[in-house]
Amino acid sequence: MSNAPIAIIGTGIAGLSAARTLHDAGQAVQLFDKSRRSGGRMASKTIGSGTLDLGTQYFTARDRRFTEIVHQWQADGWADQWSPSLFQSRDGQLSPSTDEQLRWVGTPTMSAITQGLLDDLPVTFSCRITDVFRGEEFWTLVDATGASHGPFSQVIIAVPAPQAAALLAAAPKLAAVAASVAMEPTWAVALGFATPLETSVEGCFVRDDALDWIARDHSKPGRDGSLDTWVLHASSQWSRQHIDLSREAVIELLHGAFAELIDCVVPAPAFTLAHRWLYARPTQPHEWSALADPGLGLYACGDWCLSGRVEGAWLSGQEVARKLLENL
Ligand SMILES: Cc1cc2nc3c(=O)[nH]c(=O)nc-3n(C[C@H](O)[C@H](O)[C@H](O)COP(=O)(O)OP(=O)(O)OC[C@H]3O[C@@H](n4cnc5c(N)ncnc54)[C@H](O)[C@@H]3O)c2cc1C
Ligand SMILES: NC(=O)C1=CC=CN([C@@H]2O[C@H](COP(=O)(O)OP(=O)(O)OC[C@H]3O[C@@H](n4cnc5c(N)ncnc54)[C@H](OP(=O)(O)O)[C@@H]3O)[C@@H](O)[C@H]2O)C1
């Protein structure tokens, strides 16, 4: 066994789930991410004195192992339950839609969970990996500036499937599996109101043309900030149809759909923001858990290997770590 560390590309929940387990098993890891901080689709956006969850809104825990770790995160102060006043909207009709489902969020921000998992593990941010190749014994990564990183004993690719396919070129079978996964986009819009809206809605499953989900971000536990903040998610279909629209136009259209849906007066927002998630969710769940070529030392994990949700991403990271340790 070599002393070279294991490279992990991606500091979303899947990459960090794997990283933490490998580190706890005594393996040296080195993480890379193209963003400036961890979280990926669980990232939080800082707005003045507050933050917003533009991606993941909440997560559920159905698997026993994930339920246990979520309770650990709660004990660590990284996560808490969110019990919004839930509604649904169908054919323009808004109605209460209470249920018994436990829903969790990171506290005080969604990214607290990945920040907690990352802790002091070695990481290089703002580093987009473009090439992953193997020499006689070790792996080398090349980033978008042309700089090389390595040597590494093994590589885990923990990025959305369409981005993983390119990085898996050294293992054509794994690359083909990743390339077969279609992922849908989501346009997200945040609105901040100086005066709280006069509605009891805190979360709403929407089945209309444009919107898919709205949430009163401010109602989540631990959120600060002076504005009454809302996050609106467009449906996959609407997002695909409007993929190249300007941010301003998307804000105007989704703000309009929100004002029609909600049961109160909607004044002009004091603050607006739009974000386009190109690879928001796989079109369908899979049962791969994780991809592995142990002979080469190349692995892949991510939500797209399982349920397309936070729980699936974390479980996929666990599985990739298990497979890698088993083959050392
Ligand atoms: C709008 C939206 C709403 C959602 N809502 C929910 C929800 O309510 N509940 C739920 O359970 N799930 C939800 N999800 C899904 C959930 O966010 C994902 O399943 C989960 O976060 C995926 O984690 P991951 O680690 O697999 O991938 P990611 O979080 O995408 O992490 C991949 C990381 O890899 C980095 N990366 C990519 N390419 C490179 C490269 N070439 N070099 C270096 N770094 C790279 C990225 O910057 C990113 O940090 C939502 C997703 C979106 C987009
Ligand atoms: N926008 C994106 O890009 C997304 C990517 C990935 C996931 N997204 C959403 O995350 C939610 C996670 O699903 P899950 O963990 O299974 O949460 P649930 O709350 O259980 O929701 C699943 C699904 O069930 C319907 N639903 C649940 N509770 C209610 C309720 N009280 N009233 C009405 N409907 C409810 C709802 O789907 P429908 O098709 O039945 O409307 C929920 O979506 C999940 O919301 C993903 O969409 C987004």
Image: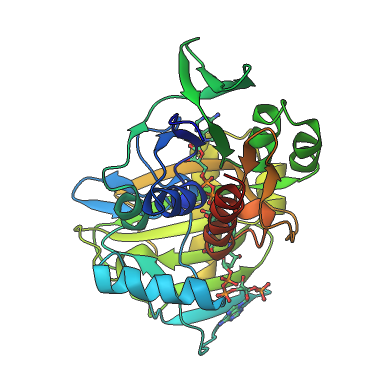
Whole-percent x and y of residue 61?
51, 75
Screen quadrant of the C terminus: top right
**Quadrant field for ligand 2:** bottom right
- Which residue is at 47% across, 11% downward? 145
Q: Residue at x 39, y 63 (%)?
A: 266
Front position in the image: 108 or 8 = 8
| Number of numbered labels in the structure image | 0
Residue at the top extreme of this rendering: 146
Residue at 68% x, 74% y is: 91
Q: Position of residue 9 (x, y in %)?
A: 51, 35
Q: Tell me the colour scheme of the image.
A: rainbow
Judge by depth and name the residue closer to the eye, 54 or 307.
307
**Residue 167 falls in image quadrant:** top right
For the question of whether residue 90 can be seen, the reply is yes
Left or right, 275 with reference to 229: right
Above or below, 199 relative to 151: below
Q: Is residue 187 above or below residue 287?
A: above
Image side of residue 327 versus residue 8, left or right: right
Q: Residue 230: image x %, image y %? A: 39, 60
Residue 129 percent location from the top left of the image: 53, 24
The residue at 53%/58% (across/down) is: 318
Determine if residue 197 is in view: no
- Relative height, residue 186 to residue 130 (above, below): below
Q: Nearer the viewer, residue 306 or 222?
A: 306
Q: Residue furthest front?
A: 1
